[in-house]
Image (cartoon, rainbow, N blue to C red):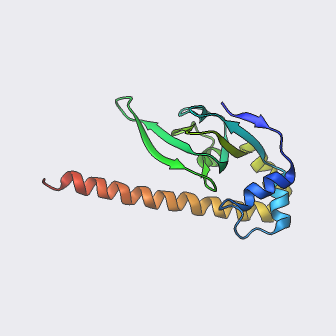
Amino acid sequence: MLHHALSSVEERISMIEKSQWGEGLSREDMERFAQYLYVARAQPSEPIFNEGAIEPYMCFVADGLVKVTKGDSKKNVKTICEIGPGRTVGEMSIIDGLPRSASAVAVEETTVLVLTKENFELLLNDNPKLGVALFRRLAQMISHRLRVSDWMLVEYIYESETPS
């Protein structure tokens, strides 16, 4: 499981700057945002979270590599994707609060910034303008992933309907 690591606000700001979440944020906004995050580490093969779990938090991968997997109807585990530095995993849990739809596991030693649902809600209340900007970015990311999934589904359907 994730192991909390001590970090300064400056270290967290540096990690935000290197992620897609740092784009378009002022230094002041990154400083505010960093106060709602904590740093955690996972060793190779350690879970970041497990499919079906209900702990609502998302992770910004600062360094390392995370594999996202999902069990199919026959209980076979399939790899969905790998998430590297600068990208995020687990966003849906802070939006809908439902059990995890997939698992995330560290492929190598991995450092993440963690934003819990509770801290995201505090941020929204304490800094509404920053909260709206982050919510907008979150919506754009989820929309992009849905578009990619739709495309992949159509390709899969096309391939399965096309005679060999």
77 left or right of 135 in image: left
Q: Looking at the picture, tell me which residue is in the foreground, 113 or 129.
A: 113
Q: Position of residue 48 (x, y in %)?
A: 62, 37
The residue under the point 64% across, 34% down is 43
Q: Quadrant of residue 106?
A: top right
140 left or right of 31 in image: left
The residue under the point 58% across, 45% down is 65
Q: Is residue 63 above or below residue 14?
A: above
Q: Quadrant of residue 44?
A: top right
Q: Position of residue 56 (x, y in %)?
A: 67, 40
Q: Position of residue 1 (x, y in %)?
A: 65, 30
Q: Looking at the picture, tell me which residue is in the foreground, 94 or 27.
A: 27
Number of numbered callouts drawn: 0
Q: Looking at the picture, tell me which residue is in the foreground, 68 or 124.
A: 68
13 left or right of 90 in image: right
102 left or right of 123 in image: left
Residue reaching furthest to the left: 163
Q: Looking at the picture, tell me which residue is in the foreground, 39 or 156.
A: 39
The residue under the point 34% across, 29% down is 74
Q: Position of residue 68 (x, y in %)?
A: 51, 42
